[in-house]
Amino acid sequence: MNRFTAEEKGTASKAFAAGAKRRKFIWLAVMTVFFSWSGYIFFAQSASIADKSEVLAKKQATNESVTASLNQLKYDVSRLNDDEYIGQLARKWYNMYLPGELPIRTEQSGE
């Protein structure tokens, strides 16, 4: 007789089929765990990124306002080097006038 008879082929193929089912089940279980883990990490990181992008947007807005005020202060400091501007400030705030100069005052409503 042949080494593989009809009876043995049936039992061998059944054992092979049972092993294949077991391997498929284990592979499916591993893939399910892996994809569950990767989905959890994806959503956790996207939530973290959303929070950090909000903080970044707030800081960028603050940075823009600070930069604008810094530029205004730099402009004011550069104007303080001008003698004519200093004279205007002295006339306006301290009522200091050049000799022989007559101040013209107008009445402003509401003050």
Image: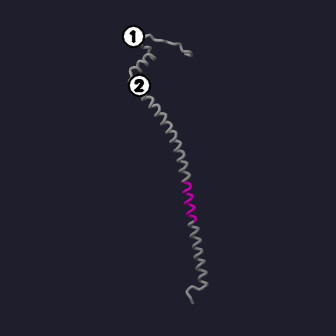
Is residue 40 placed above or below 31 in the rendered structure?
Answer: above
Earlier-in-chain disc, 2 versus 1: 2
Label 1 crowd bin: few (<14), some (14–19), many (20+), radius 10 Å: few
Q: Which residue is mark 2?
A: 79
Q: Residue furthest bottom?
A: 1
Residue 13, x across and y down, in percent: 59, 78
As helix, strand or loop, the secondary structure at mark 1 comes to loop
Give the extent of the magenta segment: 28-41
Of 13 and 99, nearer the camera is 99
Instruction: Characterize the magenta stretch by its predominant secondary structure.
Output: helix
Q: Which residue is mark 1?
A: 99
Q: Residue at x 40, y 24 (%)?
A: 80
Quadrant location, the C terminus = top right
Q: Residue at x 40, y 9 (%)?
A: 100
Horizontal side of residue 91 vs 1, given as left or right: left
Quadrant location, the N terminus = bottom right
As helix, strand or loop, the secondary structure at mark 2 comes to helix
